[in-house]
Image: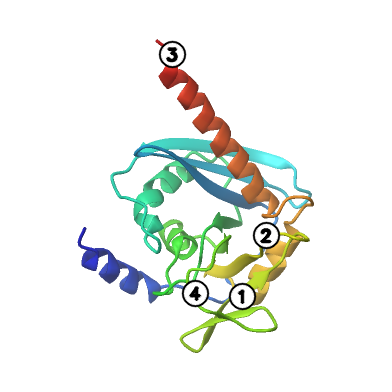
Amino acid sequence: MNLQKYNREQIEMATRVLTRDDFKKADLIGGVQQAFIGKKVISAIVLLDSDMNKVEEQVSVTDSSFPYIPGYRFFREGSAIKDSYSKLKNKPDLMIVEGHGILHPLRIGLASHIGIMLDIPTIGVAKTLLCGEIEPDGKVTFNNEIRGFELRTREYSKPVYISPGHRVSIQASIEMVKKSLRPPHKMPEQIYRAHRLSTRTKQELQKINKQP
C-alpha cells in the first residue's frame, strides 16, 4: 500500500490541531472504543455525566478495507466512529478516545483526527507508546516538544499515555483523565464502558454468524 497520500492528509490535518482549552464545560464526556471482526469495524460510544452515570450509548458496524497500520488508525476506524457519533441524541462536551492525540510521529493520532473531523474537544489515552522519550517527571517529549504524559493509573499495571487530541491542553487532558478514573479499572470509565459495549456487540455478531 502506498501511504504517501495518507501521509499528506495527516500532515495537512496536523496544522489544524489546537492544543489549548477551547471548551466551556465538560459535564458530559464520551468514550469511544473499537472492536473488529474481519473487515468490520465496531465503534462504541458511551456518554457519562460528571457522576459517571450513563446518559447514552450508541454503536455502529461498518466495513473497512484499510488494514491495521500503527500511526494510521483513523483511516481504518474513522468512518465507524463518525457513524456511531451521528446516532447520538446528546452530543458530548468532550470525548476521550482510546488512541493517541498529538503523541504521534506526525502530531495527528486518532484522537486528534477525530476531534478535527467532528469539531469537538478530544483527548487521547493509549496503552502503548508510539513515539517519544519519557522524562523522569512523566512528560513525553518528541521533536523537542512535550506531546503527552505517562500515567500509572493502577498499582502493578503498565502505564497509559495521555495526550491532547484537539481543542484541549496537555494539563486539562491529564486532569480530565484523572477525574474519569474509577478503580479498579485501568482506563478512564468512559473508555472502559465503551470497551464493554464494543466487546458485547462483537460477541453478539459472532453468535449470529454461527447460526445456521
Secondary element at image label 1? helix
Instruction: Pick whichever of labels 1 and 4 is earlier in the sequence.
Output: 4
Q: Residues within 10 Å of mark 4 (few under 14, many from 20)?
A: some
> What amino acid is found at the position of numbered circle 2 in the picture?
Ala
Q: Residues within 10 Å of mark 3 (few under 14, many from 20)?
A: few
> What amino acid is found at the position of numbered circle 4 in the picture?
Leu
Mark 3 vs mark 2, CA separation in Å: 43 Å
Instruction: Pick whichever of labels 3 and 1 is earlier in the sequence.
Output: 1
Judge whether 174 appears above or below 46 on screen. below
Pick the residue in front: 134 or 111: 134
Pick the residue in front: 17 or 32: 32
Q: Mark 1 points at which residue?
A: 170
Q: Mark 3 points at which residue?
A: 211
Secondary element at image label 3? loop
Quick check: 40 left or right of 5?
A: right
Q: Name the residue under label 2.
A: 26
Mark 3 vs mark 1, CA separation in Å: 48 Å
Secondary element at image label 4? loop
Point out the frontmost of discs 3 and 2: 3
